[in-house]
Image: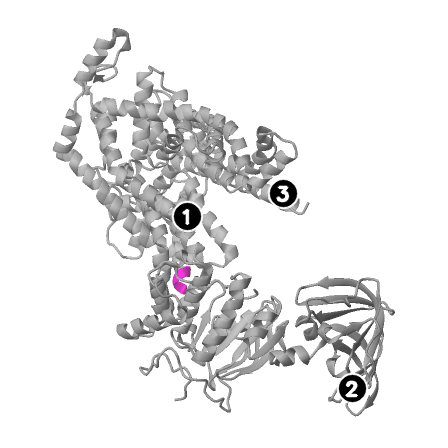
Amino acid sequence: MSGQSPEIDTAKINTAVAQATAPANDTPLLRVESVSKKFGDFRAVDRLSLDINAGEFFALLGPSGCGKTTLLRMLAGFETPDEGRILLGGRDIAPVLPHERPVNMMFQNYALFPHLSVRDNIAFGLKRAGMARAAIDTRVGEMVALVKLDGLEKRRPDQLSGGQKQRVALARSLARRPKVLLLDEPLAALDKKLRESTQLELMELQRRLGMTFIVVTHDQEEAMTMANRIGVMDAGRLEQVATPRDLYEAPASRWIAQFVGDVNLFDGEVASREHHHLTIATRDGGSIVVAEPRDLVGNTVVSVGIRPEKVKVSRRGPASDAGTSQAINRLEGVVTDVSYLGGSTVYKLKLDSGAVVRSSIANTARLDIDTLSAGQRVVAWFTPDDCVVLEK
Amino acid sequence: MSTHRIFARPARYAAIAPYLWMVLFFLVPFGFVLKISLSQTAIAQPPYVPVFDFSEGWSAINAAFAQLSFDNFRLLISDSLYISSYLRSVVVAVTSTLILLLIGYPIAYGMARLPQRWQPIAMMLVIVPFWTSFLIRIYAWINILQHDGLLNKILLALHLVSSPVVWLSTDTAMYLGIVYSYLPFMILPLYATLSKMDPSLLEAASDLGSSPRQAFWLLTFPLSLPGVGAGALLCFIPIIGEFVIPDLLAGSGSMMIGQTLWLEFFTNKDWPVAAAAAVALLVLLVPPLLLYDRLQRRTLEGGR
Amino acid sequence: MMARRIGRMSPFNITALALGMAFLYLPIVILVIYSFNASRLVTVWGGWSLRWYHESFNDRAMLDAAWMSLRVAAVSATIATLLGTLAAVGLVRGERFRGRTLFSGMLYAPLVMPEVISGLSLLLLFVALNAERGFWTVTIAHTTLTMCFVTVVVQSRLASLDRSLEEAAMDLGCDPVQAFVRVTLPLILPAIAASWMLAFTLSLDDVVIASFTTGPGSATLPIRIYSEVRLGVKPEINAICTIVIALIAVLIVIASLASNLSSSEAKSAAPL
């Protein structure tokens, strides 16, 4: 047996703080195979496939109604797929009822049992698994310590703060040492400050326990902060599965580039190709040179995406192209709007073509003599490496 | 807050008329019951002494006060007729409430599990009989239960019995009538708590390894206990004082306290003893009423 | 989210519901069917007929009793609705005033008080006041009982009403009384109408209190039915009961239509 969380009903149960993550096997821990789920005529999940490896912290990100919660509920067993299979450790779990699955869920509204104390809430799943009393007491103690609820064991849920309830819900779902922990918008009910610190605690906990976490969220910052990998969903389909960095720097589509973070987009057509550089004739930004290793055969209608923080702005533009070996894209326009955000300043420029470009510049010095103001004529520039070509 | 205070004064004036009405027609009559329960029977009009006559001055009233006594209550606790009717009231109320719970709970549970859009219809169906005349509903049962009524006909046709069973004037008929009349009172509070239950609690229980049966006994039932308490008391309290149902459906063997009161008043014309029985009945109702009040308050606080 | 919860009904749930509803409704249905029975023997089916309706319409005493009951119900329901609504306003909007606890106690007690006690105590009052017993004593007794039900119904509607509506009305120039009459009252009107119906049917239903408080020669319909029923089942009674059920059914339909109408009005007014 690897360091992975053991079956709940096996007697050999390690301490709460499990060892490091097991090396990833050949087969994924969880495999979703072309699963569909319809509610009436509405396709909540549409032929979706996904592999999740043991020890991963995976986030399902998407706008509300995209099907992410439905997918999570199918994993927990509260919904049954209309088509497709869900394999856990290579075994089809379709016939396994929710209460027999080695998977636990942390509910969005926590679903704490109002008539039971904190201790009994945490012990609930252990009692159902037929654990011995002494073992339950030890495990509950470990869980209480793990989520830092010491001294609150006898309280009822209605005597707890929002943050404490969240911890009880977490402890309760972790207590059975599930193979996979499902978290449905786990931090949605917390205020901003508490949410940020709890994100870090969840990551820390997941690393220590070496458990597989699947979290559903609509908050991209939350997903980026916590997850190793993110699956972006829209209209029942997975649009992209990638690490946070790849998702942001190499979005798979125009929609994802817009959904995750802020982006300037220029629609156009591929004009020429030279080694790994494409020249794209755009409607609003003239010719833009883009570094693109892929071969876009046949697809000449594309968009160029450039993140605002990669767009530099100054009155005169770059001193020369000599510093870099590649061409620099330049756009000229007028500053229309300056928003000072503290850590950075966002400039809105109106190009001569009428298009609007946003540039975000880090405020690295406290005093800035060379600030730009509305009405000034400026040059915006960016390198081909900082651009992405987006299809569709 | 301040707007609320602006409303308070005119709203208080609104309360004056109903306040006076209730004092005159609820509180004052109550004083009469208490006073007459301490009087003696007399062959007169009204049939009791002493009669307070304010025209004869203070001394006469003092003299009248001196005539009051607890004799009627002494009679109530010494005569086995009253004691047995007291006991019977409690036994009938407890038994009926238990039967109502056993029948009402599955119905309320079924209602709470109906698809959302069907639930208001089911609730309407439970409430409508409450609007239909109570006397008529009892009468409907007499129709069915009589010697050559529908029930006996069906039983005979199915060869379950060989000769007609006597249903009317039995305790069975009385319990049937009580359960039938009070079922909505049991179902509605039960349904209210069961339908309020968050379905994600049951999912959580299932997620943590409970089978549906376990989840029912570990979650649904304990969480519905306030509804069980409310429903039980809502039935128990009025059944204690029930008169029409036992009078029409039960045998004449033993009586409930409401029947005793009626008998003393209308047949024996013993108003003081009837009034004493009324006071005694009220005393019997105080503990369940206090319990109900506490339960309501706790659910209100819990809801916050 | 899109995860819809589908009511998962087990066969046990369905059976319990079906049996429960059958238990509640079958006796009434049987009664209605037998009221159209041509045979004098209540239990022998002699074909469909309106005979017993004719006979009950010719029963003078029964008609008098019905007329008495309808008058008592209409008058007492009207007074009870008026007083009960005022009481609800006082309790919900009046905040704390002296004697509030006693007031609410007096309004709740009759809801659970055995009818024999309510009837007896009112009779003793009427005797002491030397009041002639008949229409007015029964009406007063029914008003006292039913206004408590009215108070509860109107009170719960009033308490659930958004206070900012009244505040908005005052902000736009109404004094408190105008704000109540122009804004609050129209909004609680369905509840007031429903409580009038409730008071009416409760009055039409009562045997015990009416038996205590009425005088000789002025029996209400339930008192008549009650004395007939004690003597056994008669086909005329089936017919009369069916008429009362039909009357109440019509009232319920009107009440639910009225409340639907007002709620759909509220819905269509909402976007404005």
**Relative to B33, is A49 above or below?**
below
Is residue A57 rendered magenta in the image?
no
Quarter holding the N terminus of chain C? bottom right
Report whether mark 3 lies on the same chain as mark 2.
Answer: no
Q: Is residue C61 visible?
A: no
In the image, taking residue B91 as reference, residue B185 lies left or right, namely right
The picture quadrant where one finds residue B63 is top left
Q: Residues within 10 Å of mark 3 (few under 14, many from 20)?
A: few
Gap in angstroms between the C-alphas marked 3 and 2: 71 Å
Gap in angstroms between the C-alphas marked 2 and 1: 89 Å
In the image, taking residue C125 as reference, residue A388 lies left or right, namely right
Q: Does label 1 or label 3 sit earlier along the sequence?
A: 1
Q: Nearest the camera: C230 or A117?
A: A117
The image's mark for residue A324 is: 2
Chain where mark 1 sits: C
The type of residue carrying mark 1 is Tyr
Gap in angstroms between the C-alphas marked 1 and 3: 33 Å
Q: Nearest the camera: B168 or C20?
A: C20
Q: Which residue is mark 3?
A: C265
Write the residue at 30% across / 47% down.
B176
How many numbered marks have been drawn onto this rendered protein structure?
A: 3
The picture quadrant where one finds residue A166 is bottom left
| x and y, in percent, of residue A336 in the image | 81, 63
The picture quadrant where one finds residue A152 is bottom left
Residue at the right extreme of this rendering: A352
| x and y, in percent, of residue B280 in the image | 22, 33
Q: Which residues are magenta?
A: C10-14
| x and y, in percent, of residue C184 in the image | 57, 35
Write the residue at 52% across / 65% down.
A195
The type of residue carrying mark 2 is Thr
Q: Which residue is mark 1?
A: C25
Question: Of helix, strand and loop, which one carries label 1?
Answer: helix
